[in-house]
Image (cartoon, grey):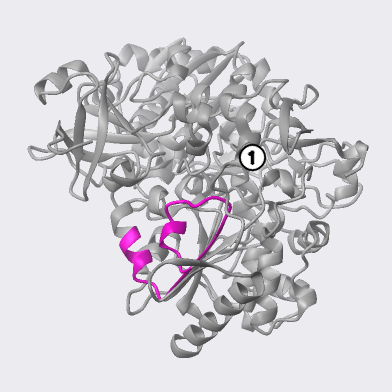
Amino acid sequence: MSEARREVATHCPYCALQCGTLLGRDGAGAAVRPDPGFPVNQGGLCQKGWTAPTLLTVPDRLRTPLVRGADGAFTPADWDGALDTVAERLRRIRQRYGPDAVAVFGGGGLTNEKAYLLGKFARLALGTSQIDYNGRFCMSSAAAAGTAAFGVDRGLPFPVADLGRADTVLLAGANPAETMPPLMRHLGRAELVVVDPRRTPTAERAALHLQPVPGTDLALALGLLHLAVVEGHRDPHYVRDRTTGFEAAWQYAMTWWPERVERVTGVPVEAQRTAVRMLADAARAYVLTGRGAEQHSKGTDTVAAFINLALALGLPGREGSGYGCLTGQGNGQGGRELGQKADQLPGYRLIADPAARRHIAEVWGVDAESLPGPGRSAYRLLDALGTPDGPRALLVFGSNPVVSAPRAAHIAQRLAALDLLVVADFVPSETVALADVVLPVTQWAEEDGTMTNLEGRVLRRRRLLDPPEGVRGDLDVLHGLAVRLGEPPERYPTAPREVFEELRRATRGGRADYCGISYERLDAGEELHWPCPAPGHPGTPRMFLDRFAHQDGRARFAAVDHRESADAVGDRYPLYGTTGRVLAHYQSGAQTRRVPELGAAAPQMYVEVHPDTAARAGLAEGELAAVSSARGRTVARVRLVATMRTDTVFLPFHYPGTGRANLITGDALDPRSEMPEFKVSAVRIEPHPGPA
């Protein structure tokens, strides 16, 4: 590598902030430092970002394909042999059961190029409708609510840096002080209103913390809208000129007077009033939602209710104010708009739309009638694996559903029931352990591509290092399989730049239009947010300033009402169990648990419990507890936290084995987004009877 490439400007491999970094050579590995010129992280990195280069050299890095033999053991294989094996077994399964007997499960951390080619590969090379991705577990409720309200879904329809000038920011179900710490650099000026059942590190910094009963955020949002209207804070001109549907939404909100809201949520009336006044009195105010509001069987309606509040106050589409969703995964935004979702084609086009199908078919050079229709969403797809009517084979790219999916023990059983499980990964995750074929693929510092962060900014991921011998890129894997399945080689480029050029054509005219974005413009330092519909277009950092994306230019209020969570607490399971992330770890923990510094910071599964709740259960600090629901049981070490609600316990979801939080979560899904209800499970807690 030339001296000029001893350091590259790239981005952190973790969350959707995509913090700017400068990655340099350090012996056989790499060292990272923050890019002081990137506005999102402003020279900061979190603990995960600083330690990210450690991932490149973890001792158990996968370096050769593995094929499970008749004895059940993995045997190293060469690439041709492994791909031949996969292709032949896929052919047999498709011939016997049909194309939908093969499924694909993608990830919100894949580059735009990978996400795009993965969707194309599924629908053309495999001919299957059965493709979805783990972003369905993260941002789908906000995506559904945002699309309904504004006509398009972009996590933040304004630059992150705009938050730095805010007077008040309401954070509903978001804990960025732990999940994306550099974002807090933009929230130092604002007074924060934090809605969260836990007293999180973010809530500790808040001017006002609203601590509702888990699963009652929707009732709280309706109550806040009620107060905004009856106490004269509604912006009547904005509502009249820029929105529709207020009266229908008000018919529900008018029944949520403050005292009723307090009875349901536990949030005091005066705290409700204070929150609304803080937003209404601010010259620049934002409402932001996160997973805590979304991961419910009513998550779409909950987000819609917070959007209703923002619309009533006249915030969205006004410079210096607005609504946004804090997208979680590294490419959660790009991953959901480029074709790996069950119901979508590239450009955020609906796969059931005939015009969308014609456009994509023309770009791909196929007949529109040959494209499959919508498939199963993520949980339904995983739940159907190995069943008589479900897929018999699954290809997994960039995900670890054995840990991350709800009803995790059940999903592990479904994976084990497959005729063929193929996993492309770079470490032996818990899902890799169940695979029939394992394909070792490159990491972030070993590949080029693009990512789209939470503000719709398209970013360049730049390669610094050559991958280890025996490791290939995901694009190479898709190409190799597609050719073996009879596809023309030129249909599946292996160069990221070539894939992006096709991606530009595929998204032209779509809701998420990348047509005007190019590697050349990005490499020249241009800051480009989609939509960017033409080569000379400057991009759109701030959306909706003149009109919303609906045909009439107006935003839509949503007529929504509160309903109970799917899991009801009772005598057998008297507590609310809720899950989430912690500072040291990320997603299923397959990466961060391998970093010694991060593992030392949060080494094992734990459960946060109020001291009174623990005492009633016969538990003390540091003891092992069994946390059980109707689905299963997880084992965790007790942490006594005096700020916890006495009716609630909290479990991080990053740990494997018997410490999986998702052993207790259920399969109730939001009817619109198909988001599982991770945030509310009826549980009980008791001493763990067995060994650690």
Instruction: Identify the residue at image location x=70%, y=79%.
Output: 483
Image side of residue 565 versus residue 187, left or right? left
Q: Nearer the viewer, residue 339 or 313?
A: 339
Residue 314 lies left or right of residue 294; in this view the side is right
Residue 411 falls left or right of residue 169: left
Residue 479 horizontal/vertical position (percent):
70, 71
Above or below: residue 20 compared with residue 398: above
Image spot of residue 229 (x, y percent):
44, 24
| Total numbered circles | 1
Q: Which residues are magenta?
A: 412-436
Q: Is residue 425 magenta?
A: yes
Q: Which residue is mark 1?
A: 13
Observer able to see residue 668 = no
Q: Quadrant of the C terminus?
A: top left
Assign the N terminus to one quadrant of the image.
top right
Q: Is residue 680 above or below residue 101?
A: above
Find residue 158 and report its horizontal and vertical position in percent.
Answer: 68, 32
Mark 1 burial class by Cα count in 10 Å: few <14, some 14-19, many 20+: many
User: Residue 468: x and y, percent?
Assistant: 70, 52
Is residue 386 visible in the rendered image? The answer is: yes
Q: Secondary structure at mark 1?
A: loop
Magenta residue check for 132:
no
531 to 157, vertically: above or below = below
Q: Residue furthest left?
A: 571
Q: Residue at x 18, y 32 (%)?
A: 575
Is residue 108 rendered to the left or right of residue 275?
A: right
Q: Residue at x 30, y 21 (%)?
A: 258
Q: Amino acid at mark 1?
A: Pro
Above or below 290: residue 72:
below
